[in-house]
Image (spheres, helix red, strand yellow):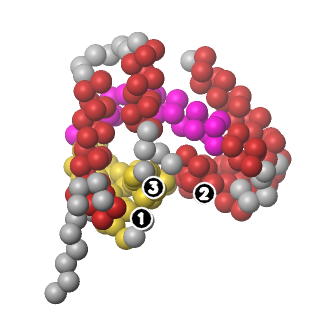
Amino acid sequence: MVTAAVLPGSATAQKSPAEIRKMLQARDLEIKTILGDRDTFSAGQKETLKSVVNGIIDFETMGREALGPHWEPLTTEQRGRFVEVFSDIVRSQSLSNLDVYRAPVTYDEITVADDRARVITSTVYKDVPARVTYEMLYRQNGWFIADIILDDVSTTGGYSRSFQSVIRKKGFDALMTSLEKRRARDKTS
């Protein structure tokens, strides 16, 4: 029988379902602690929430998947600008309904295969049960979310349909113009 020692902080330890659960539970607790029972938040508190909520999202992977075949022809500068604008929009949207983060979360199943993990959770928000699945990738400095699937609807897939349709009809520059307008709107609201 061959056994592998799992040392705290080692790649093997970090890639275990238990470590992923621990990381996500700590993030969930941090979000709930920041939220408390208050209804209003200072600009600083909102920025802290944005950082915690979005800190483990791999926006480059999510953006690349959303653009699909349209990613490859882009220059490094175009890719960087797209990821910047896209991540700003997602970050803003993440605070559109703070009460959802107060809902209890159950970690139902965590599967790990090499540098990929799937985390299936369940929650109940306003008496409506929901299943949230996180598709995660392991990078040098930990696990990051590459897609969030809410009741079988992929976040990345939704963006993909929308973005690729605009690119096919009007081109990448038109998509960027639209996204930059949306980001500007989000910043003023």
The amino acid sitting under disc 3 is Gln
Element type where label 1 sits in the image: strand
Q: Residues within 10 Å of mark 2 (few under 14, many from 20)?
A: some
Measuring from the top left, give residue 162's x and y in whole percent: 66, 49
Measuring from the top left, give residue 63's x and y in whole percent: 61, 50
The amino acid sitting under disc 1 is Arg
Query: Real-space Cα distance between discs 1 and 2?
Result: 15 Å
Residue at the location (25% across, 44% down)?
Answer: 25
Query: Real-space Cα distance between discs 1 and 3?
Result: 13 Å
Residue 102 shown in magenta: yes
Q: Nearer the viewer, residue 71 or 185?
A: 71
Q: Which residue is mark 1?
A: 116
Measuring from the top left, give residue 8's x and y in whole percent: 23, 55
Callout in the foreground (2, 3): 3
Element type where label 2 sits in the image: helix
Count of labels in the image: 3
The magenta stretch is: 83-104
Q: Residue 138 falls in which quadrant of the image?
A: bottom left
Query: Real-space Cα distance between discs 2 and 3?
Result: 20 Å
| Label whose residue precedes the other's in the sequence (1 or 3) | 1
Residue at the location (21% across, 69% down)?
Answer: 5
Q: Residues within 10 Å of mark 3 (few under 14, many from 20)?
A: few
Q: Which residue is mark 3?
A: 140
Q: Are marks 1 and 3 in contact (CB under 8 Å)?
A: no
Q: Which residue is mark 2?
A: 65
Residue at the location (80% across, 41% down)?
Answer: 174
Residue at the location (61% across, 17% down)?
Answer: 188
The amino acid sitting under disc 2 is Glu
